[in-house]
Amino acid sequence: MDEATPTPLERIRLKLALAVGENAAFDGWSLKAVESAAEQTGIDPAQARLAFPKQPAQMFDAYIHGIDAALEAHFTPERIDAMKIRDRIRALIWHRLELMAPAREAVRTGLSIFAMPLNIPLALAAGWRSADLMWRLAGDTATDYNHYTKRLILSGVYGSTLLVWLDDQSEGLMETGAFLDRRLADVMRFEKWKANWKGNELHRPSLTRFLGRLRYPAR
């Protein structure tokens, strides 16, 4: 979430967000879902209409903001510090799915809305924001290119897991859990390979040597 103190309307929007998602499962991403959420949460309907976006794509983005806020509130340092990094990431993704469970059909609709060409920039921004939050909650402090690669990889893992979750009818979401574990295992193998590659001076490409060869080609 942004470090700036939220405005009163932003606080109302966050309070409404998850309830809007639950109602959007029946009413779609619509004003009716907002009004039902206002009644459910005890918020004045006029304030709710003012605080929440009107367009479906922006409504779904506001819902994702609410999921992010709930995730951040749940994963306090005391809750997550004792976990290994892989367990932290898994717990963060799994809890997101638990938070979205009451709105699963609305999430399916929201993703379809995000897939429309006009909404792709908003979808990419939302995905990056959520991946960045999960890494920060997991304790990542990278500022080099790893900052970006980690978030791109996590966006892919989370996005693919989300698609499996949408259609998972197995008991206890076993199929989703198994899929997520396989993807995380792939990521850990990649990270191990990357660390070995970076630490191997013999095989690591040298930018200086490469540029030198461009200037003075081998005969």
Image (spheres, rainbow, N blue to C red):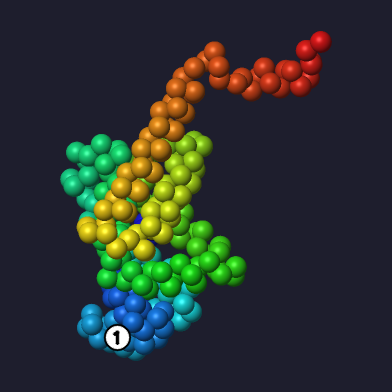
In the depicted structure, whether residue 212 falls above or below residue 42: above
Q: Nearer the viewer, residue 28 or 52?
A: 28
Q: Which corner quadrant of the image does residue 214 belong to?
A: top right
| Residue 74 can be seen in this image | yes
In the depicted structure, whether residue 211 falls above or below residue 20: above
Residue at the spot 45% in from the left edge and 27% down from the top edge: 193
Count of all numbered marks drawn on residues in the image: 1
Q: Which of 71 and 202 is in front in this view?
A: 202
Residue at the spot 49% in from the left edge and 23% down from the top edge: 197
Which quadrant, please, contains the C terminus? top right
Which quadrant, please, contains the N terminus? bottom left
Seen in the image, is 194 located left or right of residue 217?
left
Q: Which corner quadrant of the image does residue 188 belong to?
A: top left
Residue 75 percent location from the top left of the image: 24, 52
Q: Which corner quadrant of the image does residue 207 belong to?
A: top right
Q: Is mark 1 on a helix, strand or loop?
A: helix
Within-10-Å neighbours for mark 1: few <14, some 14–19, many 20+: many
| Residue 49 can be seen in this image | no
Identify which amino acid the numbered label 1 is placed on.
Ser
Residue 133 percent location from the top left of the image: 37, 52
In the depicted structure, whether residue 83 falls above or below residue 44: above
Residue 150 percent location from the top left of the image: 44, 41
